[in-house]
Amino acid sequence: MSDRKICIFEDEKYGNLYPIALTHPVFELKCGHTFLYEKIIRNFNNAKAVYFVREYLVSLVKKKIGNVSVTEGNGVTINDSNSLKGNDVLFINGRWVFMNYDLQLDGDEEIGIDKDGTIIYARLNRNIVEGFTGTDISQFLKNSKDKIKNIKTINVAVVNYLWDLVKFNPEAIKDDFKHLKETGIKGKFAKSSEVFGDNNLVFVAKTAQVHPQVVLDTTLGPVIIDEGAIVYPFTRIEGPSCIGRNTFIVGAKIREGSAIGETCRIGGEVEESIVHGFSNKYHEGFLGHAYLGEWVNLGAST
């Protein structure tokens, strides 16, 4: 087992993701069925994770991601440079939508940059990490760049602005589906409901319910319906789309490229949109190419 840690960090471009990034670190934004940090850590499940965020977000991060299995102890290590010392570290930019890329935890020292020169990842040995103090990961990595011979330019999905999350959402849903531990219809699925397309591109969790007169269309991609979700009659869900835990879909048209978070109430028509948890759009009307945070309520006649 590797003793290398991973460090997920915010760089100086977090301001491009305002207003949602005012109350979320960039890696705790939703794209697809999961948050950006979840896409990273599931690929390195033998590593311990350390997070670097703006100081005022520390308590929020502890509450929201403190139960992640790869973190240390019962909580999460945040903004602690000492926790990195004595270890080889894989630094990963939290704006990376980590999918379809083979990045090894172990290996020679290496830095990956995008076409704009932004550092996307850096695999550094403990001797270089020993020189890091404070909380400014971005500046530390820029200073370390001159010491590393292997600099790669990579073409990956990086979120520079909020609309990039919507842009990458369909592919992120497909990638999340690939990472599910199980697929198929495990929960209640009414006889008069139907999967239109490939049955192998559906996941209905054990405690989820699909009521009569529902169509799950997988011709363009997978459909995920998570634990405790209920899909009520006269709903059509077109993949790639995903429905979060304990969410109710009430006679809605969920078009392709839609990701609904946990404990939401959704009606009407939704297309190419991302909705964080605990938000409602219960009534008729259209929501398209949009990004909603938590605890948003779009009332009647919105």
Image: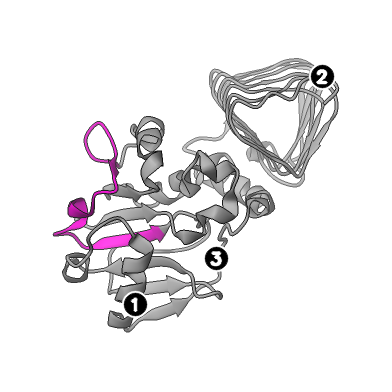
Relative to the observer, which residue lies in front, 261 or 118?
Answer: 118
The local crowd at label 2, few if under 14, some if 14 to 19, many if 20 or more residues have their Cα within 10 Å, is: few
Q: Position of residue 191 (x, y in %)?
A: 74, 17
Q: Secondary structure at mark 2?
A: loop
The local crowd at label 1, few if under 14, some if 14 to 19, many if 20 or more residues have their Cα within 10 Å, is: some
Relative to the observer, which residue lies in front, 74 or 138?
Answer: 138
| Dot 1 and dot 2 residues touching (CB under 8 Å) | no
From the image, tell me which residue sits under label 1.
145
- Cα–Cα span, label 2 and label 3: 40 Å
- In the picture, measured across the screen, residue 220 lies left or right of residue 11, that is right
Q: Name the residue rendered at 28%, 70% in the picture.
A: 107
**Which label is found at residue 300?**
2
- In the picture, measured across the screen, residue 197 lies left or right of residue 5, that is right
Q: Name the residue rendered at 17%, 58% in the picture.
A: 85
Q: Earlier in the sequence, mark 2 or mark 3?
A: 3
Q: Secondary structure at mark 1?
A: helix
From the image, tell me which residue sits under label 3.
156
- Amino acid of disc 3: Val
Residue 186 forms part of the magenta stretch: no
| Dot 2 and dot 3 residues touching (CB under 8 Å) | no
The magenta segment: 71-92
Residue 259: in sight, yes or no? yes
| Up/down of 35 relative to 231, above or below | below
The local crowd at label 3, few if under 14, some if 14 to 19, many if 20 or more residues have their Cα within 10 Å, is: some
Q: Position of residue 89 (x, y in %)?
A: 26, 61
Q: Position of residue 158 (x, y in %)?
A: 55, 60
- Cα–Cα span, label 1 and label 2: 53 Å
Q: Secondary structure at mark 3?
A: loop
Relative to the observer, which residue lies in front, 35 or 204?
Answer: 35
Which mark's residue is nearer the viewer, 1 or 3? 1
| Up/down of 71 relative to 40, above or below | above
